[in-house]
Image (cartoon, rainbow, N blue to C red):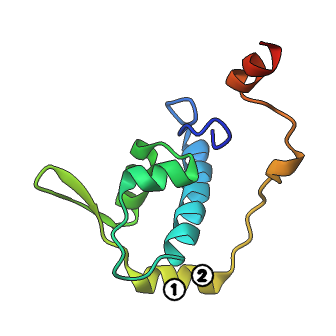
Amino acid sequence: SKREKKSGSPEKPLSDLGKISYRSYWTHVLFTLLAGQRGGDNVQIRTLSELTGIKSEDIISTLQSLNMIKCWKGQHAVFVKQEILADFMKQKKRIRMCKSECLTWEPPSQKKKKNA
């Protein structure tokens, strides 16, 4: 998703175990990103989606499960709770991530350009 500069999502509906696994991954990615932001910065869900490759709907549902999003005047507003972020970062949970430089896949759009 990130290489194609598109947001992606797993096939739905997710199993209970799939939901737990993806939500854990999404939480890790979002908290790691948000921890690098300054407290007064405004962050849009669209921007989070572009930076992470996670679909907006998945970001919203993850943040809702963490009580970090509110609906106000028809818009979703993210309320970053600094103490939750601090607790998360203290845990120093390691998550296994693949190294993108080791991935040999190319987006179809780039293959077409090479063959043209």
Amino acid at circle 2: Met
Residue at x-position 73% and y-position 26%: 110
Q: Secondary structure at mark 1?
A: helix
Query: As rendered, which of 107 and 21 lies closer to the eye?
Result: 107
Q: Label 1: which residue?
A: 86
Q: Quadrant of residue 78?
A: bottom left
Residue at x-position 53% and y-position 85%: 87
> Vertical placement of 40 versus 7: above or below?
below
Q: Residues within 10 Å of mark 2 (few under 14, many from 20)?
A: some
Query: As rendered, which of 40 and 83 lies closer to the eye?
Result: 40
Query: As rendered, which of 60 and 1 lies closer to the eye?
Result: 1
Residue at x-position 43% and y-position 54%: 47
Q: Given contact means CB atoms under 8 Å apart, are the residues at marks 1 and 2 in contact?
A: yes
Q: Label 2: which residue?
A: 89
Q: Quadrant of residue 36?
A: bottom right
> Vertical placement of 52 versus 37: above or below?
above
Amino acid at circle 1: Ala
Q: Residues within 10 Å of mark 1 (few under 14, many from 20)?
A: few
Percent position of residue 66, x then y:
40, 66
